[in-house]
Image (cartoon, rainbow, N blue to C red):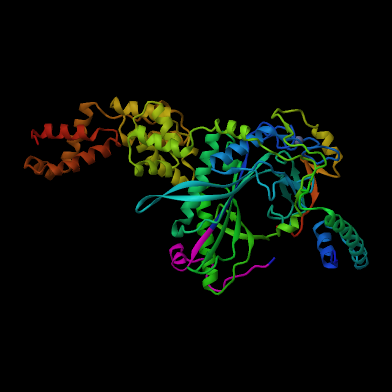
Amino acid sequence: MTGITRAEVAHLARLARLELSEDELDHYAGQLDVILQSVARVSEVATPDIPATSHPIPLVNVFREDIVQAGLDRAEVLACAPAHQDDRFRVPRILDEE
Amino acid sequence: MSTTKSSAVDVIPFDQALADFEPVLGLEVHVELGTQTKMFCACPTAFGAEPNAQVCPVCLGLPGSMPVVNRTAVESTIRIGLALNCAIASWCRFARKNYFYPDMPKDYQVSQYDEPLCSNGYLDVTVQTQDGPQVFRVEIERVHMEEDTGKLTHEGGATGRIHGADYSLVDYNRAGIPLIEIVTKPIVGTGALAPLVARAYVTELRDLMRALGVSDVRMEEGSLRCDVNCSLNRPGDPWGTRSETKNVNSLRSVERAVRSEVERQAALLLAGGRIIQETRHFHEDTGRSTPGRSKEHAEDYRYFPEPDLVPVAPSDAWIDDLRTTLPELPSARRERLQQEWGISAFELMSVVNAGALELVEATIAAGVDQAAARKWWTGELLRTANDRQVELSDLPVTGEQIARIEALIAAGSLNDKLARQVFEGIIAGEGDVDDVVAARGLVIVSDDSALIAAIDAALAEQPDVAEKITGGKFQAAGAIVGAVMKATKGQADAAKVRALLLERLGVAE
Ligand SMILES: [Zn+2]
C-alpha cells in the first residue's frame, strides 16, 4: 500500500507555510507514510456497521444560551501579541493571497 | 496568477452577449445573525464597537479555550431553513476549514462542510417583464452555519490594498459572529432576465430574513453579503467555466455584477479566449470587476469534523416548535397587501421593485391614502433615489412627513409641484415639512388680487391670446395660465387661475 507522495508532502508544507528542505521532504514523506499505513490497518478492522465517530463521547446538542458575558481586557490582550497598533493586532504583510 | 486578456474588446453590450450565450448563475449569500452573542462564545456582537473590544479566549483562539454553540443561532438557522422550504438535518456536525490567513486567529474557520443543517429548499422570486410579472423558482442547495472572520486593514504602500502593503492590522470583533451561508443550486433558463432574477432573489432573501427577525440584513454594514457565480455557454453546449465575483455590497450591485460579468465573459469568449475559474472583486464605483486570487481547491482547506464541538441533532418536536414561530412570510404579505390596497399585481410589482413596500405600508399607516402613498414613493421619491444612486429606504423621508404634506395639499395650501420642493428640502436636510414650507415660503397663492394682478400682467404681454379666448378658443388659456404659474413660481392653483382668467375676460366655457 502506498501512502503519501513526496509531492503531496511538499503541497501540505506549502499550505502550512512550512519551509522544508529537500532532505526534510524525503524524511517526512517516509515518516508520514508509516503513520498513514498504520491508520489504514485500523480501517481494515472497522466494519461497515460501525459508523465513524469524530467525538469520543456520544453527546449531541450541547448549547449555550445567547447571553453576553464579559470578554478580555483589550490592553491585556494586545500586550500578548508580538505587535499591535491603533488597538489592532499588527501582522506581517500578506503575500500571494489576493 | 494568470490574467487572460481579450485581444479586442473588454466587454460587449449585454443584449449582444445574450444573442450568443446563455448565463448560468449561482448565488452565495452570507447573513450575519442578529444574536446577542457570537456563535461559539459569549462575546457581544454589536456593530461599530472599538477595535478588539469584543473578544475573549475562544474567538481569539487562545490555547485551552473551548467553543460552545449558541442555541439561538441554531434556532435562527432552522427557522431560515424552514422558511426556505428546506429539509432540516436530524444530525449534523461542524467542520474545521483550515487556511492560513490572519483574519482568523485559529488558522481555521469553524463551518459546516458535507453536513449542512438545512438543504434542498427553494425560494420563489418575481421579476417584472414586458409580459407582466414572471415567477422564477430559485432552488436552494444548502443553508449552513459558520463563524464570521476578523477585519483586516492593510497599511503602508500606496493603495491600501494587500499589494504593496507593508503590514496589516486586525480587529477580531467580527471574528466568531454567527454567519449563515445560503447557497443556490445553479440557476438556469433566466436568459436576459438573469441580472433581475439575481437581484430579486437577494431582495426576497433580505426581506425574508427581516420578516424572520434573524438579522438586520444591512448590506452597507456587511450583515448581508453576496457572491455571484456566473458562467456562459452556447445554447445546447455544456455549462462553461464559472467565475466568482465577491464584494457585491448592494442590491443594485447584484444586478450590475451579473450584467458586467455576462458582458465580460461574452467578449472574451467571442474573441476566442478562455474563462478561467477565478475569484473577482466587484468595484462599486466602476460597476466592473477585477481578478483576485485564483480559486483554492476545496481539498486545500483540509476540512475535518470539529473535535471541540458535539453534533447538532434537532428533534422533530423542536423543529415543529420552531415552525410555529414562523411569521407571515414576504410573499404571503404581498398577497395580503395587494388585497387590502385593492390594486393589481402589476401595481404591486411596481411598489415591490421600487423597494417601497414597507415605506408605502408605513405611509398608509400614517394616514395617507394608498394611491397617494404609492404615487410619491414610486414617482418623485424613486426618481430622486435613482438620481442619487441610493436605495429608496436611504432617503430621509418618513410616512408621517408624507401624511403632513398630503394634509397641506388637502387644505389647499400646497400642490404637487410645491410638495416636490418640500421633499427636496427635507432630503437636503432643511428640516421637517413645516420647516421647509416656512423657510422656502412654499404656499399656494390663493389671494385673488395677487393672482388677478399676475393675470393682467400676462394678458398685457400677450394681447393676441385674450382675443383668441374671447373668440371662443379656450385652449389658448393655457399660455396665460402657464405665464401666471411661472410668475408665482408654481405657487398658484392652475385650475383657479384659469377660472379667474375666464371670469376676467367675461367668458364662460
Ligand atoms: Zn469571544
Q: Say left or right for B431 vs A91.
A: left
Q: Position of residue B428 (x, y in %)?
A: 46, 36
Q: Nearer the viewer, residue B379 or B186?
A: B186
From this view, report whether residue A40 is shown above or below residue A68: below
- In the image, taking residue B30 as reference, residue B391 lies left or right, namely left
Q: Can see residue B439?
A: no
Q: Quadrant of residue B231?
A: bottom right
Q: Check the picture and name the quadrant holding the N terminus of chain B.
A: bottom right
- Residue B82 in magenta? no
Residue at point 77% right, 28% down? A70
Q: Would residue B319 be found to the left or right of residue B435 on screen? A: right
Viewer-nearest residue: B463 or B398: B398
Q: Is residue B438 left or right of residue B66?
A: left
Percent position of residue B235, x then y:
47, 68
Return the x and y of residue B344 as percentages of the image width and height.
33, 41
Asked where in the image residue A32 lies, by quadrant, the reply is bottom right
- Nearer the observer, B311 or B75: B311
Quadrant where the C terminus of chain B lies? Answer: top left
Whether residue B407 is situated above or below residue B315 in the rendered picture: above
Q: Nearer the viewer, residue B89 or B95?
A: B89
Residue at the left extreme, as displayed: B471
Q: Give the mark count.
A: 0
Does the magenta run of residues contain B3?
Answer: yes
Q: Position of residue B42 (x, y in %)?
A: 74, 32
Q: Quadrant of ligand 1?
A: top right
Asked which quadrant contains residue B341, the reply is: top left
User: Residue at position x 59%, y 55% from top?
Assistant: B282
Residue B256 in view of the camera: yes
Magenta-highlighted residues: B2-24
